[in-house]
Amino acid sequence: MPPDQFQELSAELWRSAAGVLDQNWTGRYTVPSRTLYPHQWSWDTAFAAIGLAYVNPARAWRGLRSLFEAQWPDGRVPHIVFDPDIPEDAYFPGPRFWRVPAYSGRAARGSTGLVQPPMHALAAWEVYRHAAAHGADAAQQARTELGWLYPRLVAQQEFLGDRRDAGGSGLASIVHPWESGLDNSPSWDDALAAVPADMRLLDTYHRRDLDVSDATHRPTDSDHARYLGLVESYRDGGYSDNDLALRHGFVVECPGFNTILATAELALAQIAGVLGDPAAHRHRERAQGITAAITHRLWDPRTGFFHARDVRSGRLSPAHSVSGLLPLALPDLDRPFVDALVAAATSSRFGLPAPGYDRTGPAFDERRYWRGPIWINVNWLLRRGLLVHGRRAEADELRRALLCLVHSNGHYEYFHPHDGSGLGSPAFSWTAALSLDLLA
Ligand code: 9WN
């Protein structure tokens, strides 16, 4: 595309992206999508902040603060914080299903008891880094907000690194596919096969997502029955993380989740430096420890790829999913792993922008959510990885491809891996927010 045409595209995309973020702003936080996800989601809030850093940093901070105000005393940051003004049936499963106990004497702002990938430290660092461009008051606010968030971010990391180290390996385990953020990825299929799909659960509840989205683009009913059963099991155990591998039906170490955990430690090291906190060194060491554990536990030399590990069975998932490419974002990853990941990302299995799952794999499904479509957030992380490892040409190409994809098709939630057409929600916050960052 000629440079002046690209400039025009950029200006249009900037306006439309800022418009989507405006439209999805509730006054306290940004919803992922007005139609499909009318509450506050955890990692979506972080991605939204990364875009708001350019157009409205005060909203970025407000959203992060709002999420962390719902942090549990044990440090977990809930994957959804429910808006009490939205009717119970606007999203399923809603607050009544989760039955989260009131804590710290706080009248419950209802939340779930699950978590999502801890993108927030990196987001806070990004908002801080860009604050000075908005003037002295914004810079001052950024310093204050960073100070408020830092101990909370540390508590979040400690929960994941300690309470969730179910395999004793130095990696955090997820206890539900929703915790990965890549809900129905084929990476979970083997571990989920051992979880009973009680279809009667679906008779009791109404799948609200199917009212507003095409059923062939969403997880199946049997997936959903397992999702609900797993929530019931974790909930009925009081959301306790004791003896998880013995008590709970799904305990998995995910390469993407743990990559983000390590990246968060690196962001915390930077934040600690700004705040004059001596812990920077400790954060860097933790990031190195997680990186070592990822390569030790999740790399399969036979496939030359990172795979999710089922802690209960000890087995690696055979699936090649985009989460196995994400360790590319680890700065301390050794060169042979980097080379193997770049080769995989640019091979016929993926190709950039990368789909959620191997195009040649048996479970590839071009429309069904995390089983084939292209998502902007994971590709944004891949681009960071390419840059971190000095792969400038591939990073630039990926950036252009992502911007053209969103410009031609709209700020969709996900995109068809062959023709790029938009799927899911048409005005999706992280697509817009990360487009702003790619444009900047
Ligand atoms: C369950 C909000 C969230 C994202 C996840 C995405 C999807 C929810 C759902 O939407 O998950 O948390 O209802 O399917 O998979 O990554 O955070 O955008």
Image (cartoon, rainbow, N blue to C red):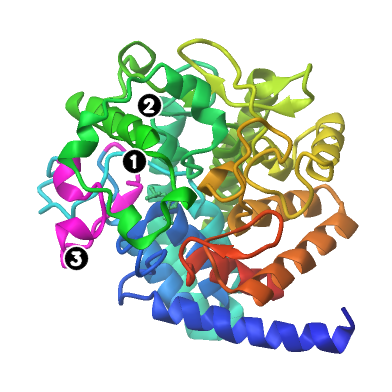
Task: Give the structural element (helix, strand or loop) at label 1.
Answer: loop
Front residue of 327/272: it is: 327
The x and y percentages for residue 131 are 56, 75
Amino acid, disc 2: Arg
Residue 151 location, x and y as percent? 40, 49
Residue drawn at (67%, 41%) of the image? 326
User: Which residue is disc 1 drawn over?
Assistant: 76
- Residue 75 in the image: state x and y as whole percent: 33, 40
Give the crowd class for mark 2: few <14, some 14-19, many >=20 residues within 10 Å.
some
Tell me where the magenta segment starts and ends, as one range: 74-99
On the picture, is 2 further left or further right than 146? right
Looking at the image, residue 237 sits to the left or right of residue 307; the answer is left
Query: Label 3 is placed on what type of residue?
Result: Ile
Give the mark nearest the N terminus, 3 or 2.
3
- Which corner quadrant of the image does residue 60 belong to? bottom left
Local crowd size for mark 1, using a 10 Å CA cut-off: few (<14), some (14–19), many (≥20): many
Using the rendered view, name the quadrant where residue 165 is placed. top left
Q: Which residue is mark 3?
A: 86
Q: Residue at x 16, y 67 (%)?
A: 85
Label 2: which secondary element: helix
Rendered residue at 51%/26% (across/down): 189
Answer whether residue 19 is visible to the viewer in this image.
yes
| Type of amino acid under label 1 | Arg
User: What residue is at 58 percent from the left and 86 percent from the top?
Assistant: 15
* Magenta span: chief secondary structure: loop
Disc 3 to disc 1: CB gap under 8 Å: no
Percent coordinates x, y for residue 421 in the rendering: 63, 65
**Which residue in the structure is indicated by mark 2?**
163
Q: Picture quarter containing residue 257?
A: top right
